[in-house]
Image (cartoon, coloured by chain):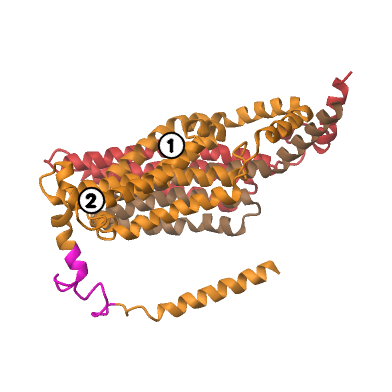
Amino acid sequence: MTFEHFSIGVGVALLLLMIPAMCRIVMGPTTMDRIVGANMVGTKTTVLLVIIGVIFGKVDMFIDFALTYALLNFTGAIAAARYLRHKGRRGIVLASTSEESVCERA
Amino acid sequence: MQKLFATIAVIITGAILLNAVEDFPRFGDPHSPPNSGVSGGSVSSSVHYLQNTYLDTRVPNVVTAVLADYRGYDTLFETAVILTAGIAVFAILRVVRRKDEEESTGSEEKACSGEFSTSDSDGEGRHRVVVGTACRVVVPLAQLFGFYIIAHGHPSPGGGFQGGVVLGTSFILLALAGGLGSALGRLREDMYLRLACLGVFIYAGIGLLSLFFRRNFLDYGALSGLLQTGGEEMARSHGIFGVELGVAMTVTSVMFALFANLSTRGELKGGL
Amino acid sequence: MVISFLSALLILAGLVFFLGAGVGILRFPDFFSRMHAAGKGDTLSTLLIIAGFALYQMRDLGDSEASVSAVLVALKMLVIIAFLYIASATSTSALAEAGWEDGNDPVIAPKHENRLAGPPESRTAAADLNRNSTHDSQP
């Protein structure tokens, strides 16, 4: 068994192990659960790109894709977190009450 | 009701697109355009480009050469499409207030929630510590990586579009880390609008420059005298690089403009 | 040969940790424990797998001119590892914070109080408490 065969096996195993995260994306009760699952799938896609590079023997090309994908995944996760934080229940409740109280005082 | 109309529109569009698939050449058809030869070339145009790209342009990456040289018109108007998207978002979303109006609304807000705004900014600062510290490390590396991708379009996959996306992402990350204000401090609105137009101008300008040397539009080989290169092939290589730079400028600034306008509903204040 | 074996060992260890993360994200009861499984298992397994492949790139280091590009590729993989080491932890932190403000409550044993949200009576009437405190402070 060469290392290429082993790499193909690792790639298939990664794809199969992504299924729980996919399940969490589909059935997650809140939006944040779905985003956590998507973030996990995105991180593993970085690894899959490296594995594809090893299988095709062009790691030097695919490593750039992997780095770019990791960067975009990170930015997407941060942006989703920021967006949902502003729409969140706790944040809005506290902000509206304190604003109201300050306005009353004024 | 709205969803029903949207569904009907999507189904009709999909049906039209599927109908167009009928006109495609069959898979492996020997008479399809990629498989039948170009005029004066070899048996197949794919093989022709694979064999002659390095001889014509001295660019090892065939994709870059085809994108920026053989199909230069296509890429020029793709860049123009991106600029148009940026202009459309600016025209539809951007809220421009007159100065007196802005002052009056600002003073009202301040009168109502003066103390709250300071406490809120404290809370924002506390929330941004982790992300801000990480982004202080990541953003310079991301910008360096973006320039690397732009410059390495010749030997490896990359080029203006991809590098522009990475550069634009670094500015978006800056906005997410320290607030939109700190990112706008680095790339002001007038600057990114000018940069977006300058990118298309550089692309079209390189094309027009070859027109002055009595050659076709976007025929970079004409620049060999101007660039002091040995032959026309190296001039094509340099021309492709210049074009990629223009594309990267447009893509970077339009990416950031889209984020800034969409995340703040055109106010360019506050936001995510 | 030894290096290939070592890298395969690293990659298999990464797969085991990823299996743990997958089970955790599917089976844990509330958002924060799922976040914990996803954040830790995912990061560690990614680092281990990429480290394994980076080690495999260095297998014929002593040979000849081909080793320069191999070292370059291995260095780039180390850059990816360093980037993910920072980015994954940061995004986990940001997502957990967003989930807290989104209103997810941790599942806790009965008889134990949720210390994150303060004592129960003040938590149910958080808005009232907030208003009362500001009213008290005013002259």
Which residue is labeled 1 in the image? C85
In magenta segment, residue B84: no
Q: Is residue C53 above or below residue A5?
A: above
Q: Secondary structure at mark 1?
A: helix
Amino acid type indicated by mark 2: Phe
* Label 1 crowd bin: few (<14), some (14–19), many (20+), radius 10 Å: some
In magenta segment, residue B30: yes
Which picture quadrant has residue C111? top right
At 61% across and 39% down in the image, what residue appears? B271
Q: Quadrant of the C terminus of chain C?
A: top right
**Residue contact between numbered discs 2 and 1, judged by CB atoms under 8 Å:** no
Q: Quick check: can you spot residue B4? A: yes
At 69% across and 25% down in the image, what residue appears? B118
Image location of residue B210, percent across then percent down: 23, 51
Which residue is labeled 2 in the image? B212
Mark number displayed over residue A48: none
Q: Is residue B9 above or below residue B198?
A: below
What stretch of residues is rendered in magenta? B28-49
- What main secondary structure does the magenta stretch of the protein show? loop
